[in-house]
Image (cartoon, rainbow, N blue to C red):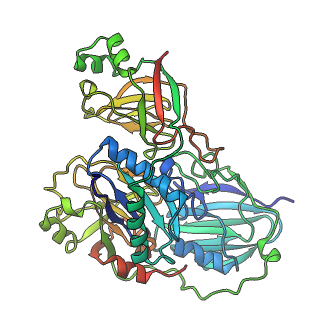
């Protein structure tokens, strides 16, 4: 039995369908697949559908929508979605990482691993892209096994485009310069963002990434 | 002759905007777009158009030189002092601008954002179907940045007014400073994590607009300490919408604006309603404001097509 999804109001023009209170892999999968499901058969007056870590975002035309009937349609869609299995194959991508970040040694030290051991464990299994909605082209990937989980840093630092960062059981790749409290473990030449393409990203939520050491 | 303007002086954060770059939130890009839609559409209507793009100016204003065929230009939004070739003119109006004109726009009495638009659109390459500048993402406008002295902006060759059947000008109220300082909101995603005392105080105590405001967000000064004892939990990141009232780790409330982060993990107590957001973002620093909760049904009944 799947846990019931919660519909939450987000201002007067959007709602989110929330599949868990905190980051859980099954909720993440449902959030991504519900967005796909809704796009195939969208309710009337929907302007935007997007998936995030554990929720599906739905923006509607607040001048035209009948909110009560939108809610009925979303609830009905959630019932149908319980039996939905996406047919498409999950795409897998290989990304080369240079493990040369300024926090690499402190991360290894915290985990009690040598650099080589850390890299081996980090790249051991493919990770799932959990969300791309944090910054342009940003890739949140998870989850590493429990033994690799470490907390964020307390200080916030700016990282460069292409930086590979690590915290809370996840690895993320940034396509832009952003401030972060995650540990900077390396960089990649791969940039998941091209403003001349629609959509502007190449790797999407729900797809898998195999990390390789450069 | 190509119609163009050359920037002689530009205040900070002056950008090229249109209605926005929608449907990119999943890819980490907020919609951006015109801050004060009411103020912008007043100008669109003055030109007899239905849509347009514009230069969005901030309080310190802009000076520019116009070169090209005679053109209609509209100046609208918050108050500014307008001089065309040295002659003081009324703001929130439209004028025929002649070749080799100098336009000076100086600070006015109220508000933060104003709009300069022409009967011909600004000619600039759209990014993801919009010319809106998003400075944080570094996209749109001129190289994803604010305008500066020396920039040259070309206008389209085609005059929309001549091509389209002239649209009947609607009666839109002239932009004015908001008289009441109560902003209505809908309770937010994380209402239930705030203690009742904080929820009550939030609806009763005054807040001040801080000097820290821009297209990303407006920080408030919580002078009554409504959130001073609030200890926040770590929350999973959720999508953000314009008007979200987010409480930072140190208890500072910040209202997210059109260049907001696409998603965030700070607690959100509520969202200012669409009908009040244009007036809210025109409030200057030190203004005192209050928040009042309303239902979604009521908020939606207040909406009307701009």
The answer to which of A115 and B112 lies nearer the viewer is: A115
Q: Name which quarter of the figure residue B222 lies in.
A: bottom left
Q: Along the line of sight, which residue is nearer the eye, B227 or A109?
A: A109
Q: Position of residue B117 (x, y in %)?
A: 66, 68
Is residue B136 among what the camera can see? Answer: no
The residue positioned farthest toward the right in the image shown: B1
In the image, residue B4 above or below residue A139 = below
Residue B256 left/right relative to B60: left
Can you say whether A16 is above or below B71 in the image?
above
The residue under the point 17% across, 63% down is B226
Residue B52: % across, % down: 66, 68
Q: Is B306 on the left-hand or right-hand side of A81?
A: right
Can you see residue A38?
yes
- Give coordinates of residue B182: x percent, y percent: 31, 78
For residue A58, above or below residue B109: above
Q: Quadrant of residue B164?
A: bottom right
Q: Quadrant of residue B138?
A: top right
Q: How many marks?
A: 0
- Which residue is painted at 23% across and 71% down in the image? B206
Residue A57 position in % (x across, y down): 42, 58
| Quadrant where the image shows the C terminus of chain B | bottom right
Which residue is rendered at x = 62% and y = 76% of the image? B43
> Foreground residue, A150 or B102?
A150
**Quadrant (top left/top right/bottom left/bottom right) for the N terminus of chain B:** bottom right
Residue depicted at 38% across the width and 55% down the height: A82
């Amino acid at each position: 039995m799947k846990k019931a999804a919660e519909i939450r109001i987000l201002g007067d023009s959007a709602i989110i369908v929330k599949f868990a209170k905190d980051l859980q892999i099954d909720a993440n999968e449902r959030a991504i697949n519900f967005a796909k499901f809704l796009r195939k058969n969208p309710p009337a007056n929907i302007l935007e559908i997007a998936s995030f870590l554990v929720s599906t975002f739905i923006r509607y035309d607040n001048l035209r929508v009948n909110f009560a009937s939108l809610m009925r349609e979303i609830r009905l869609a959630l019932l149908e979605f319980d039996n939905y299995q996406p047919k498409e194959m999950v795409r897998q991508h290989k990304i080369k990482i240079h493990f040369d970040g300024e926090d690499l040694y402190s991360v290894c030290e915290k985990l009690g691993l040598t650099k080589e051991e850390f890299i081996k464990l980090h790249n051991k299994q493919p990770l799932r892209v959990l969300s791309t909605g944090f910054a342009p082209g940003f890739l949140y990937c998870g989850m590493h096994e429990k033994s690799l989980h470490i907390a964020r840093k307390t200080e916030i630092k700016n990282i460069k485009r292409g930086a590979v960062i690590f915290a809370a059981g996840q690895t993320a790749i940034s396509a832009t310069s952003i401030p972060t409290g995650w540990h900077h473990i390396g960089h990649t030449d791969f940039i998941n963002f091209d403003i001349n393409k629609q959509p502007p990203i190449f790797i999407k939520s729900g797809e898998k990434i195999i990390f390789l050491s450069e | 002759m190509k119609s163009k303007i050359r920037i002689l002086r530009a205040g900070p954060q002056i950008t090229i905007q249109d209605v926005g770059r929608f449907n990119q939130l999943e890819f980490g890009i907020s919609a951006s777009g015109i801050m004060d839609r009411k103020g912008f559409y007043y100008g669109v209507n003055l030109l007899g158009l239905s849509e347009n793009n514009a230069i969005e100016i901030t309080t310190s204003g802009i000076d520019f030189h116009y070169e090209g065929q005679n053109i209609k230009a509209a100046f609208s939004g918050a108050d500014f002092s307008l001089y065309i070739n040295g002659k003081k003119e009324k703001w929130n109006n439209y004028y025929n601008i002649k070749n080799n004109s100098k336009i000076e726009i100086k600070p006015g009495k109220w508000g933060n954002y104003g709009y300069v638009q022409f009967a011909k659109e600004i000619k600039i390459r759209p990014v993801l179907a919009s010319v809106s500048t998003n400075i944080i993402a570094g996209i749109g406008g001129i190289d994803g940045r604010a305008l500066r002295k020396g920039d040259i902006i070309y206008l389209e060759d085609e005059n929309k007014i001549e091509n389209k059947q002239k649209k009947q000008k609607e009666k839109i109220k002239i932009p004015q400073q908001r008289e009441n300082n109560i902003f209505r909101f809908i309770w937010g995603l994380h209402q239930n994590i705030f203690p009742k005392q904080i929820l009550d105080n939030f609806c009763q105590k005054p807040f001040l607009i801080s000097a820290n405001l821009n297209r990303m967000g407006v920080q408030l000064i919580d002078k009554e300490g409504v959130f001073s004892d609030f200890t926040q939990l770590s929350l999973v990141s959720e999508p953000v919408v314009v008007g979200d009232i987010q409480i930072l780790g140190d208890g500072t409330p910040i209202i997210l604006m059109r260049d907001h982060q696409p998603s965030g993990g700070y607690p959100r107590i509520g969202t200012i309603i669409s009908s009040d957001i244009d007036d809210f973002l025109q409030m200057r620093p030190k203004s005192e404001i209050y928040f009042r909760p309303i239902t979604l049904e009521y908020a939606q009944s207040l909406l009307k097509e701009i």
